[in-house]
Image (cartoon, rainbow, N blue to C red):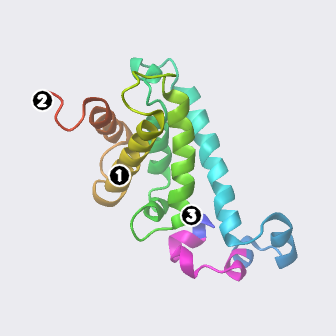
C-alpha cells in the first residue's frame, strides 16, 4: 500500500492495484481484509507499535523522556522515515489517515496526561487541543519545512503546547 501511495493518490488506488503490487490473489486479500480502507487502517496498528517502541527507546535518555508529551518525538521520528506518506494527513489527504492518526495520538496523549489535572480545563478538551496542535505542526513540517530534524520540530511543538504562543503575557 505504501509503495502505491507514493506513486498515486490514495483515492485512485484499487484492490486490483493492491493485489497486483503484493502479488497475491483476490481471495487471499479478502481473506485478510474487507477492502483497501481496511488494509489502510490496519497499517496504523504498525504506527501504534512504532510509537510505543519509540517511547521505550527514548525513555531515560533525557529529561524530556519523562515529559507529558513523550509520544511526540517518537511520532516525529516515525514521520521523518515516511515523509512522502505524511501528505495523507494534509488537506488533500485521506480522511482515514487523519482519523486513525487522531485516534492513536489521543490514546498516547491520554496516557501521558496526569489524572485529574487542575480541574479548570476538561481532560477531553486538553486531549483534543494537544492532538490538533500536534497534527498541525506535523503537517506544517512535512509540507513546508522538511529540512528540520525530528528533534528540532519536536522542540517547537513542545514549546508551543507547554508555553503557548505568548508565554510571557498575562491574561
Queried whether the magenta region covers residue 10, the answer comes back as yes
Q: Which residue is mark 2?
A: 169
Q: Are marks 2 and 1 in contact (CB under 8 Å)?
A: no
Q: Residues within 10 Å of mark 2 (few under 14, many from 20)?
A: few
Whether residue 70 is situated above or below residue 135 in the rendered picture: above
Which label is found at residue 54?
none
Q: Which residue is mark 3?
A: 96
Taking 45 as reference, is 63 left or right? left
Distance between the Cα atoms at labels 2 and 3?
Answer: 38 Å
Taking 42 as reference, is 122 left or right? left
Give the mark toward the camera: 2 or 1. Answer: 2
Which quadrant, please, contains the N terminus?
bottom right
Q: Which residue range is magenta in the image?
A: 4-18
At which x and y percent is residue 94? 51, 68
Taking 131 as reference, is 162 left or right? left
Say which quarter of the image contains residue 22.
Answer: bottom right
Whether residue 134 is situated above or below residue 163 in the rendered picture: below
Residue furthest to the left in view is: 169
Amino acid at each position: 500500500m505504501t509503495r502505491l501511495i507514493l506513486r498515486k493518490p490514495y483515492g485512485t488506488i484499487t484492490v486490483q492495484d493492491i493485489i497486483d503490487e503484493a502479488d497475491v490473489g483476490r481471495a487471499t486479500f479478502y481473506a485478510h481484509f474487507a477492502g483497501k480502507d481496511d488494509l489502510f487502517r490496519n497499517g496504523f496498528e504498525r504506527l501504534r507499535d512504532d510509537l510505543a517502541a519509540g517511547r521505550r527507546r527514548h525513555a531515560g535518555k533525557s529529561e524530556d523522556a519523562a515529559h507529558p508529551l513523550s509520544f511526540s518525538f517518537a511520532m516525529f521520528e516515525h514521520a521523518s522515515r515516511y515523509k512522502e506518506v505524511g501528505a495523507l494527513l494534509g488537506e488533500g489527504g485521506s480522511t482515514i489517515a487523519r482519523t486513525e492518526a487522531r485516534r492513536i495520538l489521543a490514546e498516547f496523549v491520554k496516557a501521558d496526561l496526569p489524572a485529574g489535572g487542575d480541574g479548570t480545563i476538561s481532560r477531553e478538551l486538553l486531549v483534543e487541543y494537544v492532538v490538533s496542535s500536534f497534527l498541525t505542526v506535523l503537517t506544517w513540517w512535512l509540507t513546508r519545512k522538511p529540512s528540520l530534524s525530528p528533534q528540532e520540530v519536536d522542540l517547537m511543538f513542545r514549546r508551543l503546547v507547554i508555553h503557548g504562543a505568548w508565554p510571557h503575557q498575562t491574561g
